Image (cartoon, helix red, strand yellow):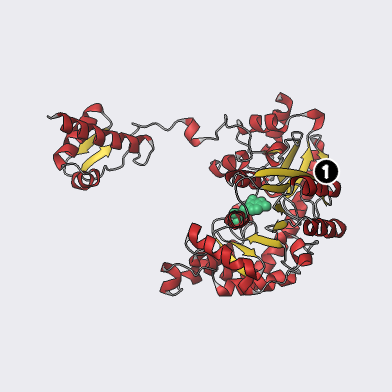
Amino acid sequence: MSLAETTRTAEVMDAIRRRVTSRTLAPGDRLPSIRGFASAMRVSPSTVVEAYDRLAAEGLIRSRRGSGFYVVGGAAPLTLAEVGPKLDRAVDPLWVSRQSLDAGPETLKPGCGWLPADWMPMTELRRSIRALARADDATLADYGGARGSAALRRLLARRMADQGVEAAPDQIILTASGTHAIDLVCRFLLRPGDTVLVDDPCYFNFLALLRAHQVEIVGAPFTPNGPDLAAFGKVLAERRPRLYLTNSGLHNPTGASLSPHVAHRVLSLAAAHDVVIVEDDIFADFEPEPSPRLAALDGLCRVIRIGSFSKTLSASVRCGHIAARADWIEGLIDLQVATGFGAASPAATELIAGALGDGGYRRHVEALRRRLSLAMRDVDAKLARLGFAPWTEPRAGVFLWRRLPDGLDAAAVATAALAEGVVLAPGDVFSVSRTASSFMRFNVAQCGDPRVYDVLARAMART
Ligand SMILES: Cc1ncc(COP(=O)(O)O)c(C=O)c1O
């Protein structure tokens, strides 16, 4: 065999080994056909035959007469590190998301930010999925328009009006998710090196996403009524941020809501310093009565409102939305086309419009509020028994922000709990100044299993 042939054979063997190691080819899977792989690798079929024969001699694959080559069972054992939580990951702003998203079904997730699947409106969703199967071909197969379904945008405009936010359907665009909506707004308004103001603490993914945009992140301490106004004004004057990113109602992670006084002051300070505000109102539907909203008070002048359906309808059917002033919409749509080629998936928006459009969703949300309120009381009492101290009592929603007793370090407790299959949310992942090490955020809907408290107590005793 010539040197060139030997090299080509080795390349084919390496390509197969990589697929086995990455588990693109799992034990028992059939290898690509000799002809097909030869053409994909631009080698002759005899090179692939030679490579497969050698891999068979190594024991990585074996041939079955008349049927091809297969990966040998157990040849690439999955290490625990691959299936379980990444225990050695630094406790950074992506820690809770990565641990929660990668968790197996047996893992308990009191630290995650979403509701358990059996708290979601499955009847409405399934009904809407059946209706979607009867939709026209274009809905199931084509790209959506650049703004997204007109029907869903009209529905959203009506719902926002109920919450005091006046937005015409043309001022609303649908996006791939709430996260994508924030990403688009950041792309629209920010350049690397700009400064962005967040609450301290704030939703950890604001920090992760802003880092991806290579901007400077500054924080203003958050109080049970909203940002600390003196600190807020000082940061605006001294650091001149371009953007302020916040949740005014049912703030993540504290559960606090803006008081009317703070809301007005935030808007006038933002106007004085020409700061754009991004109000991420993803928890709006959890409130029985809307608390003060910057988008409502400002009339979508310098405030951009973000929303999504992940918390009350489905995080699997991905879709978010942006409401902004009319002259910003075109630029946002261009970015949406550039980075996602059109709006949220038409199938997803059709499904959401179907599920939102009847009284079932309203009844679901009302039942959800009652269930969350009971869970909040129950979880609060159980945490108090473990020595956790309150910070504020949220008026609704899913989160409790609680201080650990005895100066315990939340990251150490969370790391110990993770080893026992419980994902917690330690305070510093939410804090740009990393001054929340004695706090934890609890999602009361994910705290129903008594093992949460057993593991928490053990982790606290051990640290
Ligand atoms: C404040 C906030 N914004 C946005 C998101 C993400 O929304 P989506 O699932 O639509 O990307 C979350 C999810 O936890 C959140 O808590």
- Indicate the amino acid at tag 1: Trp
- Is residue 90 depicted above or below 42 in this figure? above
Decide if residue 44 is on the left or right side of residue 260.
Answer: left
For residue 215, which quarter of the picture? top right
x%, y% of residue 319? 56, 61
Q: Residue at x 45, y 67 (%)?
A: 143
Residue 201 seen anywhere in this rendered image of the structure:
no
Q: Nearer the viewer, residue 116 or 87?
A: 87
For residue 410, which quarter of the picture? top right
Q: Residue at x 72, y 35 (%)?
A: 434
x%, y% of residue 413? 69, 31
**Residue furthest right in the image:** 261
Q: Residue at x 75, y 54 (%)?
A: 250
Decide if residue 342 is on the left or right side of residue 119.
Answer: left
**Residue furthest left in the image:** 1
Quadrant location of the N terminus? top left
Q: Classify mark 1: residues with Cα within 10 Å, few (<14), some (14-19) or many (20+).
A: some
x%, y% of residue 183? 59, 54
The residue identified by callout 1 is: 391
Q: Is mark 1 within 8 Å of ligand 1?
A: no
Residue 236 seen anywhere in this rendered image of the structure:
yes
- Is residue 296 depicted above or below 17 in this figure? below
Quadrant location of the C terminus? top right
Q: Nearer the viewer, residue 300 or 269?
A: 269
